[in-house]
């Protein structure tokens, strides 16, 4: 049995459907992320789990217990908000201790717990500082410690890193993951940042317009997107509309060019398909060498070890290719090229 179950949850705000029949099962100790663009319903779902919003339909269960109508203070969940929400008139230490004091923990027990948490987040020297005396990253660490202080059954995090700069964001997400693993606490994390979700999650649910598009490990979602939305939202993906010509050999045709694609095997000839290709597997060579899909480089972006090429294909589509920067020096803007990819690299969706 799953530890946290979200069963057929629906939520509307007037005529807006925020969540539409969402069902998720999260295991004990799992780091589970809700990923999607703004307005997809991920924060609404988190608030329903926390008890801040009632669902119009559906149920929430925790360790087999029905908690859909249970008030937030009885769910024993810790929540970290995007805006930190620290009490400005309390020191960092007092912020972390607050939940324990409300619950009536004895002073000596509170002191031990607070000391453990500040050691865990690496901020023991900042215990007496007020929030305005802390950096954004330090404030978020304190907010995390405050959520963990009450020994919650589930840790909920609502875009906790979005207000931080890129370097601190990467550092803090790694720290959050390390703490989660160390404590073994079940965690439900909300983000719109696909890189963040891929880096720290055990599993990810991709949401769009209130519905679940796909649930899987980061590798499964990246390598085998189940829908065109997931393919376009997670990572950079090339989309080419083609027609199956030979389902036995995996041959598809794109604007007169025949390509061998393993994923096309077993499909009926004449079927229209969407060929999905990641930029890192695209091979680019001078057009004189022949073969492949012909096009012309119309833009380049240097990205350190790789250079991203934007190629206008003869079929009218734009294709993106990431090639080693050392090779890209010979592939200048305006160069006519041919592009190919290994047969086992693309994925295919029916149109």
Image (spheres, helix red, strand yellow):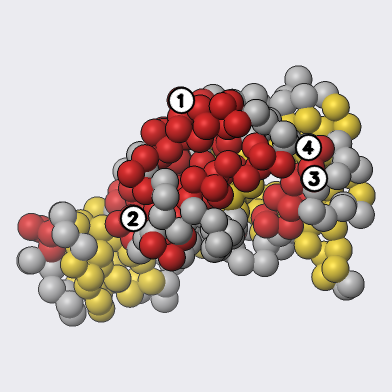
Q: Residues within 10 Å of mark 4 (few under 14, many from 20)?
A: some
Quarter of the view holding residue 312:
bottom left
Q: Earlier in the sequence, mark 1 or mark 3?
A: 3
**Tag 3's secondary structure?**
helix
Q: Is residue 109 left or right of residue 210?
A: left
CA separation, marks 2 and 4? 31 Å
User: Which residue position is annotated with label 3?
Assistant: 72
**From the image, which quarter does the C terminus lie in?**
bottom right
Asked whether the residues under the numbered discs 1 and 4 touch, taking CB atoms below 8 Å apart as contact, a structural biologist would say no
Task: Check disc 1: other Cα within 10 Å, few if <14, some if 14-19, many if 20+.
Answer: few
Labelled pair 1, 3 in contact (Cβ < 8 Å): no
- Spatial CA distance of label 3 from label 4 is 5 Å
The dot on residue 182 is: 1
Mark 2 against mark 4, which lies toward the viewer? Answer: 4
In-front residue for pair 339/217 = 217
Mark 2 vs mark 3: in front = 3
Horizontal side, residue 276 vs residue 189: left or right? left
| Mark 1 residue element | helix
Q: Marks 1 and 2: in contact by CB < 8 Å?
A: no
Q: How many marks?
A: 4
Which SS class for mark 4? loop
Question: Does 204 appear above or below 318?
Answer: above
Q: Residue at x 52, y 32 (%)?
A: 111
Q: Position of residue 328 (x, y in %)?
A: 13, 63
Instruction: Using the rendered view, name the quadrant where residue 191 is placed.
Output: bottom right
* First in residue order: circle 2 vs circle 3: 3
Q: Which residue is mark 2?
A: 168
User: Which residue matches tag 4?
Assistant: 75
Q: Earlier in the sequence, mark 1 or mark 4?
A: 4
């Amino acid at each position: 049995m799953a530890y946290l179950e979200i069963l057929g949850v629906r939520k509307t705000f007037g005529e807006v459907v925020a969540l539409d029949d969402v069902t998720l099962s999260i295991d004990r100790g799992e780091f589970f992320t809700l990923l999607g663009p703004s307005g997809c319903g991920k924060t609404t779902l988190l608030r329903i789990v926390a008890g801040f919003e009632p669902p119009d339909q559906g149920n929430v269960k925790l360790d087999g217990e029905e908690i859909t109508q249970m008030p937030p203070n009885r769910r024993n969940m810790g929540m970290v908000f995007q805006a930190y929400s620290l009490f400005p008139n309390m020191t960092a230490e007092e912020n972390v201790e607050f939940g324990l004091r409300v619950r009536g923990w004895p002073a000596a027990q509170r002191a031990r717990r607070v000391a453990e948490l500040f050691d865990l987040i690496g901020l023991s020297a900042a215990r007496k500082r007020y929030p305005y005396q802390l950096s954004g990253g330090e404030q978020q660490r304190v907010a995390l410690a405050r959520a963990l202080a009450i020994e919650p059954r589930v840790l909920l995090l609502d875009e906790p890193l979005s207000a931080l700069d890129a370097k601190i964001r990467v550092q803090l997400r790694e720290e959050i993951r390390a703490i989660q693993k160390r404590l073994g606490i079940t965690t439900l994390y909300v983000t719109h940042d696909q890189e963040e979700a891929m880096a720290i999650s055990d599993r990810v649910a991709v949401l769009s317009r209130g519905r679940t598009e796909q649930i899987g490990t980061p590798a499964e979602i990246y390598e085998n997107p189940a829908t065109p939305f997931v393919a376009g939202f997670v990572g950079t993906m090339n989309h080419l509309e083609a027609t199956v010509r030979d389902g036995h050999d995996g041959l598809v045709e794109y604007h007169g060019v025949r390509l061998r694609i393993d994923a096309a095997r077993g499909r009926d000839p004449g079927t229209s398909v969407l060929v999905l290709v990641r930029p890192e597997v695209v091979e680019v060579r001078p057009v004189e060498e022949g073969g492949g899909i012909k096009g012309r480089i119309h833009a380049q972006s240097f990205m350190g070890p790789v250079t991203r090429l934007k190629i206008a294909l003869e079929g009218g589509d734009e294709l993106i290719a990431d090639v080693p920067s050392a090779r890209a020096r010979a592939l200048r803007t305006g160069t006519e090229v041919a592009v190919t990819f290994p047969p086992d690299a693309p994925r295919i969706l029916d149109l």
